[in-house]
Image (tube, grey):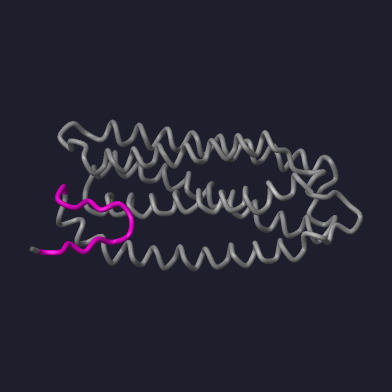
């Protein structure tokens, strides 16, 4: 009886053994990058926690956060994680002879949800700034605008990456390198969802009840 070693993330397994073997070092290296990115976010979370009381007489979290828009953003981003999961399943089990229509369709839905999330977040930022809650107003707001927009910048990068992958699928098809890039993109996208859950739980929810 043999034991199959699997890298963290979706494994292509018996559906594409060669690419699955090639993916292991690439996916592991990308996990190292994600962990370094997680350290940056952890530092910003710590900074936010320290600066939370530093409102300098300006707007407080309860004054600036809105539950319903933030909840909608959360649902949109979590749904995008589901749709990317469906894209991963289509990549693994879809019939390549039938083309990449299903895979590209799920990527397009994920892209649309990512763009909706960014639009809603930018509207929230514009509302905050219009109400005088600008980064220069206090230490609390400086730390907020260092943390949350950085996540949005990552989502924007993820959306651009999805567009690149859709182009690569059209040009190169579902070859080994495209599949490995999609595996890494999947890890990146799901990582962003995890970070957003942390932002929603640590930043928004406690701020709304203060």
Residue 66, above or below 57: above
Magenta stretch, overall SS = loop
Q: Quadrant of residue 110?
A: top left
x 78%, y 42%: residue: 128
x 57%, y 40%: residue: 74
Residues 152 and 68: in front is 68
Residue 14, above or below 139: above
x 21%, y 57%: residue: 20
Query: Is 87 contained in the magenta span?
Result: no
Give the percent coordinates (x, y) of residue 80.
46, 38
Query: Is 13 contained in the magenta span?
Result: yes
Give the percent coordinates (x, y) of residue 37.
51, 64
* Quadrant position of the N terminus in the picture: bottom left
x 50%, y 35%: residue: 113
- Start and end of the magenta stretch? 2-15
Q: Quadrant of residue 46?
A: bottom right
In-image side of 53 versus 77 (left or right): right
Give the percent coordinates (x, y) of residue 114.
51, 39
Give the percent coordinates (x, y) of residue 137.
85, 55
Residue at the far right in the pictured view = 57
In-image side of 2 versus 35 (left or right): left
């Amino acid at each position: 009886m043999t034991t199959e070693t699997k890298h963290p993330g979706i494994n292509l397994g018996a559906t594409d053994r060669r690419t699955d073997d090639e993916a292991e070092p690439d996916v592991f290296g990308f996990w190292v990058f994600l962990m370094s990115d997680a350290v940056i976010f952890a530092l910003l979370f710590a900074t936010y926690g320290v600066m939370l009381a530093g409102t300098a007489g300006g707007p407080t979290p309860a004054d600036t956060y809105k539950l319903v828009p933030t909840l909608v953003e959360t649902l949109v981003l979590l749904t995008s994680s589901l749709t990317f999961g469906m894209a991963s399943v289509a990549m693994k089990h879809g019939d390549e002879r039938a083309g990449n229509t299903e895979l590209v369709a799920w990527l397009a839905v994920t892209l649309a949800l990512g763009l909706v999330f960014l639009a809603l977040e930018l509207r929230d930022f514009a509302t905050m700034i219009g109400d005088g809650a600008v980064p220069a107003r206090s230490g609390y707001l400086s730390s907020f605008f260092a943390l949350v927009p950085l996540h949005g910048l990552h989502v924007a990068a993820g959306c651009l990456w999805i567009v690149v992958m859709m182009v690569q699928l059209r040009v190169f098809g579902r070859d080994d390198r495209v599949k490995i890039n999609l595996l890494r993109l999947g890890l990146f996208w799901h990582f962003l969802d995890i970070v957003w859950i942390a932002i929603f739980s640590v930043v928004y929810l406690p701020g709304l009840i203060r």
